[in-house]
Image (cartoon, rainbow, N blue to C red):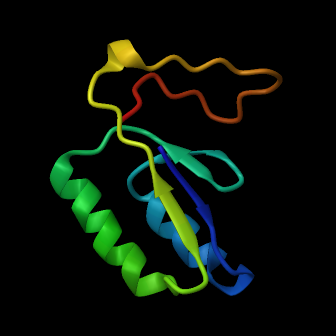
Amino acid sequence: MIVYDVAVERINGVRQLLRQYLTWVQNSAFEGELTEGELEKVKIELRKLIREDQDSILFYVVSSQKWIRKDVLGIEKAEVSTVI
């Protein structure tokens, strides 16, 4: 899962990049499954798009599916069966 808080002028670039790899589930949240290599590639590309002194991107990495549970209250914008 990747969540972000970036300046308005960089939101579209970050969103477009993450959509190439993950499923957009909330306004600033993506989830899905990535290999370690893909995750590193995403981080490299994000560093080119953001300003680390102003923006924030959080990576939640789950090493085992048995340790994650997702409960949704209300509408689920995009259903994902696998989470990193």
Q: In the displayed structure, does residue 20 sit left or right of residue 27? A: left
75 shown above or below 84? above
Find the residue positioned furthest to the top: 66
> Front-most of 47 and 82?
47
Q: How many marks?
A: 0
Q: In the displayed structure, does residue 37 sit left or right of residue 44? A: left
| Residue 35 picture quarter | top left
Q: In the displayed structure, does residue 44 sit left or right of residue 19? A: left
28 shown above or below 66? below
17 shown above or below 75? below
> Residue at point 45% right, 22% down?
81
> Residue at point 58% right, 27% down?
79
> Residue at point 57% right, 65% down?
15
4 shown above or below 77? below
* Spot occupied by residue 5 in the image (x, y as percentages of width and height): 65, 66
Find the residue positioned furthest to the front: 53
Classify the position of the C terminus by image quarter.
top left
| Residue 74 picture quarter | top right
> Residue at point 42% right, 39% down?
32
Q: In the displayed structure, does residue 44 sit left or right of residue 49? A: left
* Spot occupied by residue 47 in the image (x, y as percentages of width and height): 39, 80
> Front-most of 56 and 84?
56
* Spot occupied by residue 39 in the image (x, y as percentages of width and height): 28, 56
Find the residue positioned furthest to the left: 37
* Spot occupied by residue 53 in the image (x, y as percentages of width and height): 54, 86
